[in-house]
Amino acid sequence: MKKNWWKESVVYQIYPRSFKDSNGDGIGDLRGIIEKLDYLKELGIDVIWLSPIYKSPNDDNGYDISDYKDIMNEFGTMADFDELLKLAHEKEIKIMMDLVVNHTSDEHKWFIESRKSKDNKYRDYYIWKKGKNNQPPNNWISCFSGSAWEYDKETDMYYLHLFSKKQPDLNWENPDLRNEVHSMMKWWLDKGIDGFRMDVINFISKNQEFPDGINGDFSKYSMNGPRIHEFLYEINEKVLRDKNLITVGEMPGVNVEEAKLYTGEDRNELNMVFQFEHTDLGNGKYGKWHKNSFKLTELKQILSKWQKGLENEGWNSLYWNNHDQPRVVSRFGNDKEYWKESAKMLATCLHMMKGTPYIYQGEEIGMTNVKFENLNDYKDIEIINAYNDLVVKKGRSHDEMMEGIYDRGRDNARTPMQWDNSENAGFTTGTPWIKLNPNYSKINVANQINDEDSIFNYYKKLIEIRKNNKIVVYGNYDLILDDSEEIYAYVRTLNDEKLLVICNFTGNNINFELPSNIKSEYKKLLISNYDKCNEKTLENISLRPYECRVYHI
Ligand code: NOJ
């Protein structure tokens, strides 16, 4: 396996809107990020993934871009961005930009032109189809509820939008459009950025027959579509090759076999992908809008399949959280009596795996899910549209839907970063664009940064361990105790070195035995979330609630 800097890095995701506001307008901004670079340096991360900062009407908080070469008003100016990049580089922190090119905003100049007439130069930049008997061209349902087609009376045709109707899908079949995207990417690379996180990039190639999907599901015809590898190879060849960048493709619905093709070392497409099998656990009749539930054996089976599947071909990204996911300590841990223990355990379980770890802002201090009683306090278009569809239109009960929103809604990740216990958690001096999580007086950076035993300092140690032990980066992974519903345990192996990782996913004391070949070996405890580990040998182990340990053997 080749050695690469991006395999040895830890990435920190910033959702700028909710990170740090520098000018009191209630919205995070680029100068706010500049203020916090020393904080990130202290944590020890190598790369910042910046969620979109481009000009946008914010129908979907910047994932609807109206100008790829300009900065969103609320976030600052291009001069602020240039300064951020320069200062980050001075601190040896790289910057990975979000590339959103499955769709634009309907306010992008290409779309404004495109909708004007059938023979406009930009018409084919988007996907236009005639309706069928006064109905949309097919039955596809958008990710944000309702038909994926919007009727436009100007030309009496429909355009495709797999997300909101203000996010029309680009037509990648058109070589002019592809060239525009390539040259825009080069423009950013010329500024000196270090890579791209590519938004729903496996959606860009669509089956050109546009067949109906089962119950309106477009995934078979618009995910991992017929020309996807060709398009990614082309991007690589024309834009990325030989630049030693970091690239990660966000890919809902991707499986291991596909991921090998996307990330295979000799295939020249991407470095890694974000897969969703573990975050989709507990989905049901109403999609993700269900109360949180998962079986540990299922979680282990999924993550282990990815670990083994990409062990020799390709590379994994490792994440629990991002701006679309609920907070991990609330989802797979216990955000009440074992808040600190379970946040650390989950971090250990993920960071000792093989792949590039991603930390989402606030995860490193154990930020939790939020419960807003008033629906109006939710700002996310996905939540609002799903509520209108499932409750208002289809009659699901309000209470059941709210449970789903509390446990899985995206705004759980988007409440402002909790810096200290002053008003608005030190996020803004103005009125925050979304309410804070009221627990900020207890959970905040100021409380943790100087506390040796804090979640923050634990993340810092995990990052150091990765830096000081090649086995964490390059060792192979093997699951043990496969059938346990309580313990997640695995072994990493590099040459004659081994790491043993044992994590208790419950609030109970759990006794268990390790496989005999492991018990007998010499051990040194590298890290644990409890200070005294009772055992002298590995004969019979007892783990306390949410306890985890990593042994070097
Ligand atoms: C995935 C992004 O992570 C999400 O936030 C966004 O809503 C969709 N793609 C559409 O761009």
Image: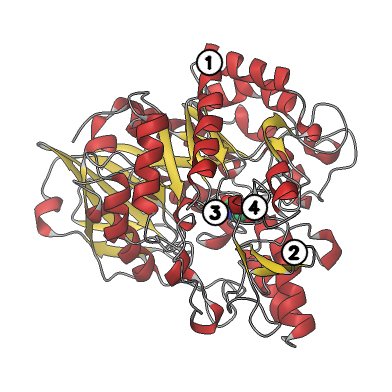
The spot of residue 272 in percent (x, y) is 36, 44
Residue type, label 1 = His
- Which residue is denoted by mark 1 in the rendering? 89
Q: How many marks?
A: 4
Q: Residue at x 76, y 32 (%)?
A: 75
Q: Is mark 3 within 8 Å of ligand 1?
A: no
**Quadrant housing the C terminus:** top left
Dot 2 or dot 4, earlier in sequence: 4
Image: 258 above or below 428: below
Q: Nearer the viewer, residue 521 or 267?
A: 267
Camera sees residue 415: no
Residue type, label 2 = Thr
Mark closer to the observer (1, 2)? 2
- Which residue is denoted by mark 2 in the rendering? 155
**Quadrant housing the N terminus:** top left
Give the Cα separation between the discs numbered 2 and 3. Answer: 18 Å
Give the Cα separation between the discs numbered 3 and 1. Answer: 35 Å
Q: Residue at x 25, y 30 (%)?
A: 470
On the image, which quarter does residue 159 sit in? bottom right
Secondary-structure class at tag 4: helix
The 10 Å Cα crowd at callout 1, few under 14, some 14 to 19, many 20 or more, is some
Q: Nearer the viewer, residue 476 or 315?
A: 315
Image: 370 above or below 428: below
The 10 Å Cα crowd at callout 2, few under 14, some 14 to 19, many 20 or more, is few
- Which residue is denoted by mark 3 in the rendering? 171
